[in-house]
Image: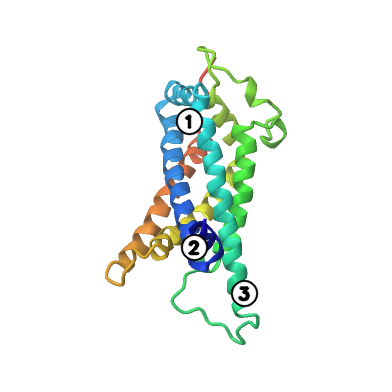
Amino acid sequence: MNIVSNIFSSSLGKKYIMAVTGFVMFLFVLGHLAGNLQIFLGAEAINRYGHFLQSNPELIWPARIFLLLMLVLHVWSAVKLSAENKAARPIAYGAWQPVGSTYASRTMLMSGIIVFVFIVYHLLHFTVQVKYVNLTGESFIDYTDPQKRHDIYRMMVAGFSNIWVSGFYILGMALLCLHLSHGTSSMFQSIGWKSPAYGPFLDKASRWLAVAIFAGYTSIPVAILLGFVKEVPR
């Protein structure tokens, strides 16, 4: 119990919590992207994938609860560390000049909060499928394909056909990837796996990986808006 208490009470422990929870959610971002990109394989592929997840609640619900716990711990540790840093220097610099830091690193807390709001909307939109946030006037719950599975392909096409929804999604992904561009690299720093020898490589790799993730996720609404991915005639 003392070990757990020390982890949650010390600054170093909170940094470890942020690093570990961030890594778990980073893996989810990659896995979620791999699943979403199946829309380019057609309705059958992504609807089969979605049906597999929805028909195995014993897998999906523990995973959801675990990810929610990771998110809560990540946000908690970020807020606590930010408060501790401000408490350590209650008087701001007279003329602060950032040296050796990036815009992403200086806005981690703010971008994280905005990303959290985006995640809530995204869950209401495509997971909970609240009718009043999809801006289509239809209920996605009623979408079914010829095999009587939930028609995820049609839902995504309908959802992203609205330019305002797609625009907010692209903005949310931009902020998420800005967050990842620094967070992925700092994760290695927090757990002591970053040295001056390969630190610059990790920084560059994190930024390029964030760009690749952004390109992957935003390719879906862009393809739908441009008409490359269309609703299957029924």
Say whether disc 3 or disc 1 marks the residue closer to the N-terminus.
Answer: 3
In terms of image quadrants, where is residue 151? top right
Q: Give, as a three-letter code, the residue at label 1.
A: Val
- In the rendered image, the vertical position of residue 85 relative to residue 32, given as above or below: below
Q: Which of 163 and 12 is in front in this view?
A: 12
Q: Nearer the viewer, residue 29 or 11?
A: 11
Mark identifier at residue 115 = none
Q: Where the C terminus falls, by quadrant?
A: top right
| Residue picked out by circle 2 | 13
| Residue picked out by circle 3 | 86
At horizontal 68% and vertical 26% (from top left) the residue drawn is 138
Q: Are marks 1 and 2 in contact (CB under 8 Å)?
A: no
How far across and how far down the image is residue 60, in percent?
A: 51, 31
Element type at marker 3? helix
How far across and how far down the image is residue 82, in percent?
A: 59, 67
How is colour applied across the structure in the image?
rainbow
Q: Which of marks 3 and 1 is in front?
A: 3
At horizontal 52% and vertical 43% (from top left) the residue drawn is 67
At horizontal 42% and vertical 43% (from top left) the residue drawn is 30
Q: Give, as a three-letter code, the residue at label 3.
A: Lys
Q: Give, as a three-letter code, the residue at label 2.
A: Gly
Residue 117 relative to residue 56: left or right: right
| Residue picked out by circle 1 | 229
Q: Which of 29 and 135 is in front in this view?
A: 29
- In the rendered image, the vertical position of residue 20 relative to residue 201, given as above or below: above
Q: How many numbered badges does the structure rendering display?
A: 3
- Alpha carbon distance from label 3 to label 2: 18 Å
Q: Which of marks 1 and 2 is in front?
A: 2
How far across and how far down the image is residue 35, in percent?
A: 44, 34
- In the rendered image, the vertical position of residue 95 relative to residue 2, given as above or below: below
